[in-house]
Image (tube, rainbow, N blue to C red):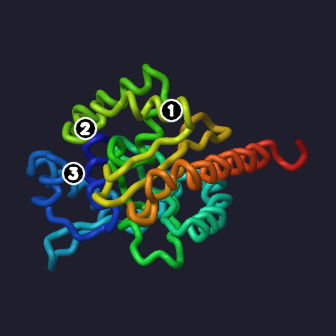
Amino acid sequence: MLARGLAILRAFEPANEWRTNTELATLTELPKPTVSRLTANLTESGYLIYSAERAAYRLSTSVLALGYVAASNRNLVVIARPLMQEFADQHNLSVVLGSPDGGSMVCNEVAHSRSLLFTLRVRVGSRLRMGQSALGRALIGSMGDAERDRVLARLEETDHETWSVLHGQLKTVVSQMQRRGYVIAAGTLERGTNGVAVVIDTPDGPHGFALGCAAPSGILSVSRIESEVAPDLLALKRRLEAELSVTADGPDS
C-alpha cells in the first residue's frame, strides 16, 4: 500500500497540476477504485488537496516542502548552486544536479546559461528517465554489477521501452564511465540535444548524485564535449567532492 501511495504522489511531479482520479489511474497504471481509495486517504492525511470544483487533486504545500528537503543533500546543493551557474554561463548550456528515485532522476538543482536562447525543459523537482538522461546513464555506469542488475531489472518491469534502448547500449555506457569518468548522451533525452554527466560521491556514500549538462547539438557537439566540456565537468566534480569532504570533517578536524 505504501508503494502505491508513493506512486500517486510522484504522479503530480514536476508541475503539481490538478489531476483527476482517472488521470492518476492512467499515469500510475493502478485500478481506478484503488486510486480513489488512495487519494481519499492521502487527502485525509494532509498530503493532497481536493478541489470539488475541478473534481481533482494536487499535492499539499507540506508534502512539497518535505519532498524537496528529502530529495537532496542540502550541503551539496548549497555548494553546487553558484558553481553550476558559473559553469553554465562559461560553456553556454544548462547544468543539472540530480539524484535517483525509482526509475527516474530527480532534479535537485538546475542552472541555465543566461545567454542561452534554448534551455532544457527542466526545473527543480523535474523527473528525467534514468535510462535516457545522461544523469541516469552516468549513475548506472558507475554502479557495481549486482547493483546495476537490480536497477535494470526494475527498469525492465516499470519502463520497458526505456530499458530496451538502454540495454542495447549498456556496454558503451559502462565503458565510458570506466575509461573516461563520464557518459555522453546524444539525443537520447530530447532529439537534437546532447548531454554529458558525471557522478558525485558524497561522504554519505558513492554515486548518490549525478551532475550533467546539456544543450542543442549545434552548440554542444560530441567533439566539444570530449575536448572542452567533459574535462571541465570532471574538474567541477572533484571540486565539489573535495568541498563536501571538508564540510563533513568539520572546521576542527
Query: Which residue was labeled with disc 1?
Result: 142
Kind of residue at badge 2: Val
The count of marks equals 3
Kind of residue at badge 1: Ser
Identify the element where label 1 is drawn: helix
Q: Earlier in the sequence, mark 2 or mark 1?
A: 1
Discs 2/1, front:
2
Residue 27 lies, with reference to residue 203, above or below; the image says below
Identify the element where label 2 is drawn: helix
The front one of 178 and 26 is: 178
Kind of residue at badge 3: Leu
Identify the element where label 3 is drawn: helix
Discs 3/1, front:
1
Q: Picture coordinates of residue 247 (x, y %)? A: 76, 49
Q: CA distance from mark 3 to mark 1?
A: 36 Å
Q: Is residue 105 left or right of residue 202?
A: left
The quadrant of the rendering that contains the C terminus is: top right
Q: Residues within 10 Å of mark 1 (few under 14, many from 20)?
A: many
The front one of 20 and 34 is: 20
Q: Picture coordinates of residue 11 (x, y %)? A: 26, 56
Discs 3/2, front:
2
Residue 127 lies, with reference to residue 164, above or below; the image says below
Question: In percent of the image, x 61 and y 68: which residue is there?
Answer: 90
Query: Which residue was labeled with disc 2?
Result: 165
Query: Which residue was labeled with disc 3?
Result: 38
The quadrant of the rendering that contains the N terminus is: top left
Whether residue 62 appears in this view of the structure is no
Q: Picture coordinates of residue 44 (x, y %)? A: 28, 60
Q: Picture coordinates of residue 151 (x, y %)? A: 36, 31
